[in-house]
Amino acid sequence: MTLSPKNTDVKSLFDTIAPEYDKMNNIISLGSHKKWRQKVMNKMVFPNEAQIIDLATGTADWAIALAENSDVKTKIVGLDFSEAMLAVGQTKVDLSDYSEKITLVQGDVMALDLPDNRFDIVTIGFGLRNLPDPKKGIDEMYRILKPGGQLVILETSQPDSPVVKPFWQLYFGHVMPLFGRVFAKGKYREYKYLDETTENFMDYMTLGQVLLKAGFQKVRISRFNLGAAAAHYATK
């Protein structure tokens, strides 16, 4: 059992919400998560015949998008610890044009059963805040990246504007869990937990410092929607 700092069984939680996860993502983010991912990928450099891993891949949206944006010989691994999320993702991969490029596997981001210096690119989208120990996960990302390889983290964040922040807190603290109750078969508790991970996760500047302390270089940060999300780019 993988427990969050709030002693939530995170794997079980994501197994529970897997059937509605994609629908809820679109509702909660008002479709913005797809635009954020595309903006991030527009800033990435895709080597020819790259080896890419998307950690906490969930239902494989980013793995499929990475396949679409890379050359035909690139290989992508999508890793997640939830069997139910991966099952939904596998169906999407099988129906896509990229099934030969993408392999989905089950695993723990904080203890990857992968060799050192394996990948040209490591991505993680909206998954870092759900790790019981994000710093341990970041150390693993550093380990499996090739020297000169790229790390890209896309994550929810907190606005720092005193005008915007109260509305952000209202939305994530009350509206989002209500959506879980209305649109996700009564899953108020699960979406309340996801709100709490967003509110309590480190801010974008702190995450940048954690990346530097882990050994990453050339850390760059982009923010979206008045600070509701942030992308961190770094090089090993």
Image: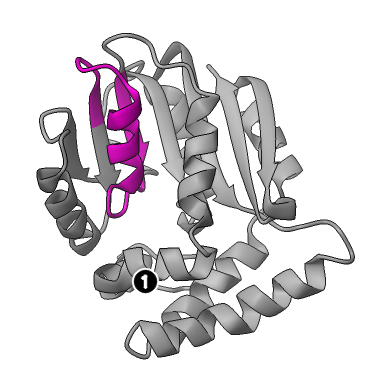
**Mark 1 surroundings within 10 Å by alpha-carbon count, few (fewer than 14), some (14 through 19), many (20 or more):** few
Image: 91 above or below 199: above
Q: Quadrant of residue 171?
A: bottom right
Residue furthest to the right in view is 162
Nearest to the observer: residue 229 or residue 27: 27
Q: Position of residue 9 (x, y in %)?
A: 36, 71
Per the image, is 137 magenta?
A: no
Image: 22 above or below 63: below
Nearest to the observer: residue 221 or residue 35: 35
Please report the residue visible at 72 percent of the width from the left and 74 percent of the height from the top: 169
Image: 86 above or below 65: below
Secondary structure beneath label 1: loop
Per the image, is 70 magenta?
A: yes
Task: Give the residue number, with chain letter if any, for mark 1.
Answer: 9
Stretch in magenta: 51-76
Image: 96 above or below 219: below
Q: In the visual, does 175 lie left or right of 112?
A: right
Q: Position of residue 228 (x, y in %)?
A: 67, 56
Residue 113: tell me if it is visible: no
Q: Quadrant of residue 122?
A: top left
Q: Type of residue at label 1?
A: Asp
Q: Position of residue 230 (x, y in %)?
A: 64, 45
